[in-house]
Amino acid sequence: MSSFDDVQEFVGQANRVSDMNGLRSLLEDTVKSLGFDYFALLHHVDLSRRTADYVRLIQYPQAWKEKSVSQDYYSDDPILAVAQKSVTPFLWTDVPRLLQLTRRQEEILNNAHLSGMGDGVTVPINIPGEFAGSCSFCMRTGRDIPLSALPTAQYLGCFAFQAARRVVEMEVTAKPAIEEAQQRLSPRQLDCVILAGRGKSDRDVGQLLGISGQTVHQHIEEAKRRFNVATRQQLIVRALFDSQITFADLMN
Amino acid sequence: MVNLITSYNRSKFRAPLEAMHRDRKKVFVDALKWDVPVVDGQYEIDQFDTDAAIYLVALAPETQRHLGSVRLLPTTGPHLLSEVFPFLCDKGVPVGDDIWEITRLCTAPAKDIEPRLVRRRLATAMCEFGLLYGINRYTCVTHVQYLSNLLAVGWECELLGEPRQVDRDVVGALSISISPATLQLFREKLGSRTPVLQLDAFAAAA
């Protein structure tokens, strides 16, 4: 069987998986057959977040997992920073070209290497109205990345992330988090905040959405209340920070 | 609203269709730099824009301005996957009365148009059209970078073969299943319980 057939089989089975551990072991086999050693599926949200409404499935060397948590590398991770701004997959070796690295970011890449993480590729998963996300595949230090498998890896990343999102949705529905629900914007509020963030007036937003400018105003006010902020600018920044909207939403 | 335009009612929609071909040129040739034919220096029209093609065209209610559109081709005749990209299908190009192909999905490149909302409307129209015409699945050629979005939106997709590097992009052939559940989901997203597809008598006769 070719590695593409393995991915097809993964796609078929991933639709039926009902828990994260099942998905993890399924994905582990497929990633190996593609020729990679490690993987990570992530929504880019703060680790301290108390709720479970995001994807976080990581199969990285233990040494690196411990190091990155203890040093709080997450919020400065250059790979995630590139993924958030990127539409197409990128090789980690290209990151210094794609991003002006800070000293801390250079330190992060060096330490990752020392902890056994070699070359890798990241598939950005940026869905409007959702946390920014990504799927990465990588090698043990010293092993070459299977370049011919990249198109199939990109395909696998998309379906694996979708499967993870579905599992998370099932788990969250089972255990609703009340505090979180108060801060999540409704789909209509998201539409309004995104368009306001693109500099549109209530009236223009209303025309685009087929509702009145007054209704748009109410959606924005309600969104401000949810975040407990006073101005539109704060609302947009807060929604961005929370990854409820993405840079891609605002700059498309 | 989204208009269903076939060879039977095309004459009624001459201006919007012209606008569609002009916008297709701006999107696919000027912006995306695709190597596709241009007619009279301003219209993108290719060998599949024939009487067999059906267009779903979103028009502004009063001005009839072109907001976005998609072209649907029966797979029983020549279509993009069979003629240009058959190598994307590992087990042969799927063909049948219940399989149609999606191509040239675009939104008008204007500042006062919100592409995501137009796409949502077109997606709902494609489901309605599919259920109306007895289409079980659509096929299409897509850049793999759009795949995560298609999945998140709720399309039930399957890849027909290994994705390939074509020029600078990775492309794949998709099969998309259409069911009443998909339509229900899209209508919820759109906030609408009624059809978006505008049928007129001549189109229905097709």
Image (tube, helix red, strand yellow):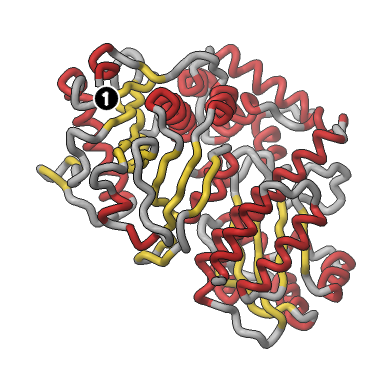
Identity of the amino acid at label 1?
Ile
Going 86% across and 64% down the picture, which residue do you hit? A69
Counting from the top left corner in percent of width and height, residue B77 is at 24, 43
Quadrant assignment, res B196: top left
Going 27% across and 47% down the picture, which residue do you hit? B79
Residue A9 is left or right of residue B47, and the answer is: right
Counting from the top left corner in percent of width and height, residue A173 is at 80, 34
Q: Is residue A180 above or below residue A151?
A: above
Quadrant assignment, res B13: top left
| Residue located farthest toward the left when viewing the structure as drawn | B40
Quadrant assignment, res B34: bottom left
Pointer 1: residues within 10 angstroms few (<14), some, or many (20+)? many
Q: Is residue A207 above or below residue B149?
A: above
Q: Nearer the viewer, residue B116 or B136?
A: B136
Position of the C terminus of chain B by quadrant: top left
On the image, numbered disc 1 is attached to which residue?
Answer: B5
In which chain is the residue bearing label 1? B
Classify mark 1: helix, strand or loop.
strand
Residue B28 is left or right of residue A4, and the answer is: left
Counting from the top left corner in percent of width and height, residue B163 is at 46, 62
Residue A181 is left or right of residue B190, and the answer is: right
Q: Is residue A133 visible?
A: no
